[in-house]
Image: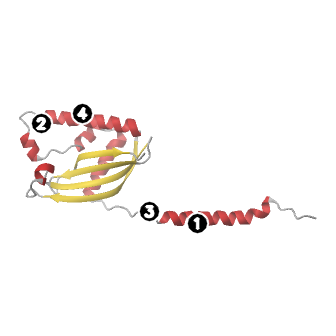
């Protein structure tokens, strides 16, 4: 008489193979985790405020936190044109918000991938004339939106003195294909 094998007799083999695959997958994924990035406290506060404004769709807060105009640049503006400059930058913030949310959806969360700070003193000519003196912080964040999950956000933040607040001088939202 032939010995008939049932699906139940393969159960221990399938369970052992499944456990082996789970352990293998966990072991392979552990090496890919990157250590958390150390972000200066005042920079982290700025990022929290900035991205909370994205989440709550607070255009006014985004406008207040965006665009840097150095004292040198402010002094070069013709009299009465500072308000026109502010209105132009506020309009650009609105356009950027509409474009990003149209492409990627509603903002959900973020994490900082890289951060680098550089101090430019007023004596560092011509860099200080071109970029402004102060603390310049370059960041790359991974943001999650409702339509596109992983969007890289490049930011250039500036604060004029150690005790002043950061302002977003430039940003770029980009989703990998």
Quarter assignment of residue 61:
top left
Secondary structure type for disc 4: helix
Give neighbour class at mark 3: few <14, some 14-19, many 20+ (Cα, 10 Å).
Answer: few
- x and y, in percent, of residue 47 in the image: 30, 51
Q: Earlier in the sequence, mark 1 or mark 3?
A: 1
What is the crowding at mark 4: few (fewer than 14 residues within 10 Å), some, or many (at least 20)? few
Which residue position holds label 2? Answer: 82
Q: Earlier in the sequence, mark 3 or mark 2?
A: 3
Report if the CB atoms under discs 2 and 1 are less than 8 Å apart: no
Tag nearer the camera, 2 or 1: 1
Q: Earlier in the sequence, mark 2 or mark 1?
A: 1
In front: 94, or 44?
94
Q: Position of residue 41 (x, y in %)?
A: 27, 58
Q: Residues within 10 Å of mark 1 (few under 14, many from 20)?
A: few
Q: CA distance from mark 3 to mark 2?
A: 47 Å
SS at mark 3? loop
Residue shown at 13% from the left, 49% from the top: 130
Q: Which residue is mark 3?
A: 33
Q: Residue at x 43, y 43 (%)?
A: 148
Task: Categorize mark 2 by other alpha carbons within 10 Å: few (<14), some (14-19), many (20+).
Answer: some
Label annotation for residue 23? 1
Q: CA distance from mark 4 to mark 3?
A: 40 Å
Counting residues from the N terminus, which is met first, the one under dot 4 or under dot 3?
3
Give the percent coordinates (x, y) of residue 82: 12, 36
Circle nearer the N terminus (2, 4): 2
Marks 4 and 1 sit apart, C-alpha to C-alpha, by 53 Å
Marks 3,2: beta carbons within 8 A? no
Q: Residue at left 40%, top 40%?
A: 104
Q: Which residue is mark 4?
A: 91
């Amino acid at each position: 008489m032939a010995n008939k094998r049932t699906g139940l007799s393969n159960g221990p083999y399938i369970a052992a193979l499944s456990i082996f695959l789970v352990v293998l997958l966990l072991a392979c994924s552990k090496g890919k985790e990157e250590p958390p990035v150390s972000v200066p406290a005042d920079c982290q506060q700025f990022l929290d405020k900035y991205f909370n404004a994205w989440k709550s769709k607070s255009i006014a807060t985004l406008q207040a936190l965006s665009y840097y105009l150095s004292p040198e640049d402010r002094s070069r503006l013709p009299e009465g044109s500072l308000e026109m400059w502010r209105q132009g930058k506020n309009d650009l913030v609105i356009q950027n918000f509409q474009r990003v949310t149209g492409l990627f959806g509603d903002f959900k969360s973020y994490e900082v991938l890289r951060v680098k700070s550089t101090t430019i003193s007023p004596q560092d000519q011509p860099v200080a004339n071109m970029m402004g003196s102060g603390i310049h912080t370059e960041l790359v964040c991974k943001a999650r939106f409702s339509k596109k999950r992983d969007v890289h956000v490049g930011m250039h933040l500036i604060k004029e003195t150690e005790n002043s607040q950061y302002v977003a001088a430039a940003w770029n939202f980009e989703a990998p294909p």
